[in-house]
Amino acid sequence: MAAPEQVPDPFVHAGPWTEQDWLDLPTEQHVELVDGALVMSPRASNPHQRLAYRTWGALDAGATVGWDVLGEPNVRVGIDRVLIPDVAVIARADMAAAMNDAADVALVVEVVSPGNAAYDRILKPRLYAEAGVRWYLRIEQDGPVGHLHELDGASYREVAQGPVVGLTAPFPVTLDLPHLAR
């Protein structure tokens, strides 16, 4: 009897990962690329998914002409750096593309979960800021409470905080986070 055929593990890899290596991974995985290293996250909890999805819907409903609101898009924030925010507002997103350049992204939204809190509070904002993404909205599920940050030079400055967050750019919209989390 012949031995079963060995299926190669797509995560076995020698050396640093490139963006092309990352693009070749199975799409069902939630994997980001930071400086040649893979950062894996489990699928989000139901409350996280509901809040992210409803935030996407509220932003999409308020979007003006020229803006696309996408859930979990791939965003290139540098060489061999690809992040997947929960939601992003992108100027005229190319719907045939697998990748969005940070230069086209006006706002990213990250809903913080216990397993990724430091990543969403510390590393991701730094990488988004270095890439020039103007607005960063971090949503803490406890409350929930939004923390809206605007790019100020090379880092973010918090400009609004609370359970209800009003954005004036890239288009005006008010996010009532407790209502969205229900």
Image: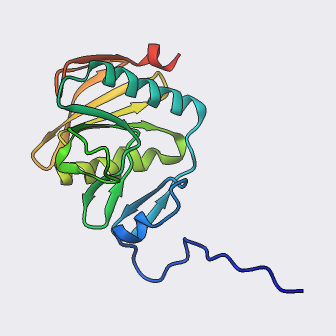
Vertical comparison of 55 with 83: above or below:
above
Number of marks in the image?
Answer: 0
Which sits in the foreground, 114 or 56?
A: 56
Toward which corner of the image does residue 24 lie, by quadrant? bottom left
Which sits in the foreground, 134 or 112?
A: 134
Expressed as whole percent of the image width and height from the top left, the position of residue 129 reads 21, 48
Looking at the picture, the colour scheme in use is rainbow
Seen as rendered, the residue at the extreme left is 153
Residue at position x 20%, y 23% in the image: 64
Expressed as whole percent of the image width and height from the top left, the position of residue 174 reads 29, 15
Residue at position x 27%, y 19% in the image: 62
Expressed as whole percent of the image width and height from the top left, the position of residue 59 reads 32, 24
Vertical comparison of 44 with 84: above or below:
above
Toward which corner of the image does residue 149 lie, by quadrant? top left
**132 lies left or right of 83:** left
Residue at position x 55%, y 71% in the image: 10
**70 lies left or right of 132:** right
Seen as rendered, the residue at the extreme bottom is 2
**28 lies left or right of 118:** right
Which sits in the foreground, 11 or 93?
A: 93
Vertical comparison of 69 with 40: above or below:
above
Residue at position x 52%, y 33% in the image: 49
Expressed as whole percent of the image width and height from the top left, the position of residue 150 reads 18, 35
Seen as rendered, the residue at the extreme right is 1
Toward which corner of the image does residue 176 lie, by quadrant? top left
Which sits in the foreground, 145 or 132?
A: 132
Q: State the quadrant of the N terminus.
A: bottom right
